[in-house]
């Protein structure tokens, strides 16, 4: 009996030791802004290269060289053993696709996700590119993923709840007839790549987050939206590539944001990429 109580108390205790999400001051936010700006610049750099015929390994090489040439550090490379600079997730791949030698072709949709460390601070963002011409089904899904990200970002309010984000995204996706991936979430970031708070893109029935959003909190919003089931499977061989369980299409966009006194600032807005309201 004593043993059982100990286990329960430890389980409860473990929840309590979850570190509080860091709140960054002006100077720290400036570090995050610079990292976000560079990461956006990297996405702008890669955009014209995402064409039919290019391999995702070639894109990876370009991103690596660009990052190094600017004196910065690719965050993914070597992170938990990840082998490359970027993640390239094609069609039914939900996230963490490893660049390979298959040329992209017309009709593909590919998410390119990149993370850079600039002077110790992380910037993390991604875009799904359409290799035109694509099917209308693919276009609609990509549109929904982009809009879902912005619906989530728009739900951020100072001293609002973190669960407002997931609730807004889930409601929006359901309205468009799509499913939201549950096993992978947004995340706090700063000096660490993945830190508190976790940012689910739905509202978990069990233990929903109690985090209150505060000015100075930094995290990503990066919903993965599926045409079919929300369920996913991890590649048995590479242990990275995540696919939809039914092999239906999946699309994703990601921004890094900082909570402000009035809402949220996007730190990874690109110059040439899609802006809120964009039609694909
Ligand atoms: N950039 C991804 C994210 O949005 C993480 C990639 S995991 C890695 O969180 F191992 F590939 F780095
Ligand atoms: Co990312
Ligand atoms: Co991320």
Image (cartoon, grey):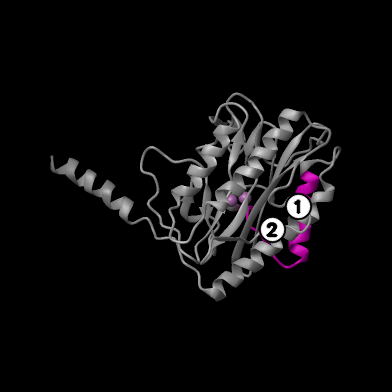
Residue at 80% from the left image edge and 50% from the top image edge:
47
Decide whether residue 72 is among the magenta residues: yes
Cβ atoms at labels 1 and 2 below 8 Å apart: yes
List x then y, in percent, for residue 194.
Answer: 52, 54
Q: Tag 2, which secondary structure?
A: loop
Residue at 81% from the left image edge and 46% from the top image edge:
58
Magenta span: 57-78
Camera-side residue of 68 and 143: 143
Decide whether residue 272 is among the magenta residues: no
What is the number of the mark on residue 162?
A: none
How many discs appear? 2
Residue at 64% from the left image edge and 26% from the top image edge:
248
Task: Give the vertical position of 263 relative to 108 (above or below).
Answer: below
Task: Give the vertical position of 247 relative to 32 (above or below).
Answer: above
Label 1 neighbourhood size at 10 Å, few (<14), some (14-19), many (20+)?
few
Horizontal arrangement in the rendering, residue 15 relative to residue 261 (left or right): left
Camera sees residue 179? no
Residue that label 2 marks: 269
Camera-side residue of 123 and 216: 216
Report whether the residue tagged 1 is closer than 8 Å to ligand 2: no
Camera-side residue of 154 and 21: 154
Horizontal arrangement in the rendering, residue 239 relative to residue 51 (left or right): left
List x then y, in percent, for residue 241.
Answer: 62, 37
Considering every residue shown, the one lying at the far right of the view is: 53
Label 2 neighbourhood size at 10 Å, few (<14), some (14-19), many (20+)?
many
Residue at 36% from the left image edge and 43% from the top image edge:
207
What is the number of the mark on residue 273?
A: 1
């Amino acid at each position: 009996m004593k043993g059982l109580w100990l286990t329960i108390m430890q389980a409860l205790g473990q929840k309590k030791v979850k570190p509080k999400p860091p709140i960054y001051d002006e100077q720290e936010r400036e570090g995050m802004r610079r990292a976000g700006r560079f990461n956006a610049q990297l996405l702008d750099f890669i955009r014209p290269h995402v064409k039919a015929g290019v391999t995702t390994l070639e894109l990876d090489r370009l991103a690596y060289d660009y990052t190094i040439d600017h004196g910065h550090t690719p965050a993914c490379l070597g992170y938990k053993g990840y082998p490359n600079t970027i993640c390239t997730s094609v069609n039914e791949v939900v996230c963490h696709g490893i660049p390979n030698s298959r040329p992209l072709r017309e009709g593909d949709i590919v998410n390119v996700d990149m993370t850079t460390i600039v002077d110790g601070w992380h910037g993390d963002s991604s875009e799904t590119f359409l290799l035109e011409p694509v099917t209308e089904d693919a276009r609609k899904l990509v549109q929904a993923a982009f809009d879902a990200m912005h619906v989530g970002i728009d739900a951020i309010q100072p001293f609002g709840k973190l669960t407002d984000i997931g609730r807004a995204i889930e409601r929006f996706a359901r309205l468009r007839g799509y499913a939201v991936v549950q096993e992978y979430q947004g995340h706090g970031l700063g000096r660490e790549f993945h830190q508190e708070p976790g940012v689910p893109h739905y509202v978990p029935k069990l233990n929903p987050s109690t985090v209150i959003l505060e000015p100075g909190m930094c995290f990503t919003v990066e919903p993965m939206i599926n045409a079919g089931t929300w369920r996913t499977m991890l590649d048995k061989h590479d242990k990275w590539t995540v696919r939809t369980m039914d092999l239906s299409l999946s699309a994703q966009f990601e921004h890094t944001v900082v909570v402000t006194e009035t809402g949220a600032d996007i730190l990874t807005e690109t110059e040439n990429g899609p802006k809120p309201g964009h039609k694909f």
